[in-house]
């Protein structure tokens, strides 16, 4: 289990993703890293209002909210806070489902708002 990750700003995410590096593509608004538990699963975190927020202070990056790899066997759950991996508790199946539902609702609200924002009545 890794304790830190190093940001690397790239245009394209490379085909071979190295452990311990968080590849960040600003043009494509996405970030990718290998799961820090060592299982080798690739984790993609889109940078979007409805997905993850990336913060860079000139040296270190943070991602918000936490990253839960529920769809891969390790079920790792952690935060990336200023290049540190902060391991969090694994979620129960019920909590994962509730989280997915919350996410789905948040996306519906966000996209409805954007739609109205463009001047259309729904
Ligand atoms: Zn893993």
Image (tube, rainbow, N blue to C red):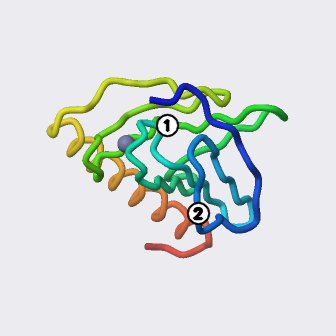
x and y, in percent, of residue 19 in the image: 56, 45
x and y, in percent, of residue 68 in the image: 37, 41
Among numbered discs 2 and 1, the one appearing first in the sequence: 2
- Residue sitting nearer the eye, 49 or 23: 23
Foreground tag (2 vs 1): 2
Q: Residue at x 42, y 50 (%)?
A: 40
- Circle 1 is placed at which residue position? 65
Kindly state the secondary structure of the residue where label 1 is placed.
Answer: strand
x and y, in percent, of residue 105 in the image: 33, 53
- Circle 2 is placed at which residue position? 16
Answer above or below: position of 89 versus 120: above
- Tell me the quarter of the picture where residue 27 sits: bottom right
Q: Residue lying furthest right in this view?
A: 58
Q: Residue at x 61, y 59 (%)?
A: 30
Kindly state the secondary structure of the residue where label 2 is placed.
Answer: loop
Q: Residue at x 45, y 44 (%)?
A: 35
- Residue sitting nearer the eye, 23 or 79: 23
Count residues near mark 1 (Cα–Cα under 10 Å), then give few for <14, some for 14-19, many for 20+.
Answer: few
x and y, in percent, of residue 101 in the image: 26, 50
Compared across the picture, whether 39 is left or right of 18 comes to left
- Residue sitting nearer the eye, 73 or 45: 73
| Total number of numbered discs in the rendering | 2
Quadrant that contains the C terminus? bottom left
Quadrant that contains the N terminus? top left
Count residues near mark 2 (Cα–Cα under 10 Å), then give few for <14, some for 14-19, many for 20+.
Answer: few
Q: Residue at x 55, y 57 (%)?
A: 46
Answer above or below: position of 99 versus 11: above
| Picture disc at residue 85 | none
Compared across the picture, whether 70 is left or right of 85 comes to left
- Tell me the quarter of the picture where residue 76 sits: top left
Answer above or below: position of 104 versus 91: below
- Residue sitting nearer the eye, 68 or 35: 35
């Amino acid at each position: 289990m890794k304790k830190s990750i190093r940001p690397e700003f790239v245009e394209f995410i490379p085909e071979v993703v190295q452990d311990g590096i968080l590849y960040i593509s600003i043009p494509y608004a996405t970030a990718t890293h290998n799961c820090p538990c060592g299982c080798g699963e690739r984790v993609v975190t889109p940078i979007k209002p409805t997905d993850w927020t990336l913060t860079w202070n000139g040296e270190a990056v943070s991602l918000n909210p936490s990253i839960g790899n529920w769809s891969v066997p390790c079920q790792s759950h952690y935060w990336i806070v200023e290049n540190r991996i902060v391991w969090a508790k694994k979620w129960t199946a019920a909590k994962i489902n509730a989280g997915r539902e919350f996410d789905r609702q948040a996306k519906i609200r966000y996209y409805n708002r954007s739609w109205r924002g463009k001047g259309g009545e729904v």
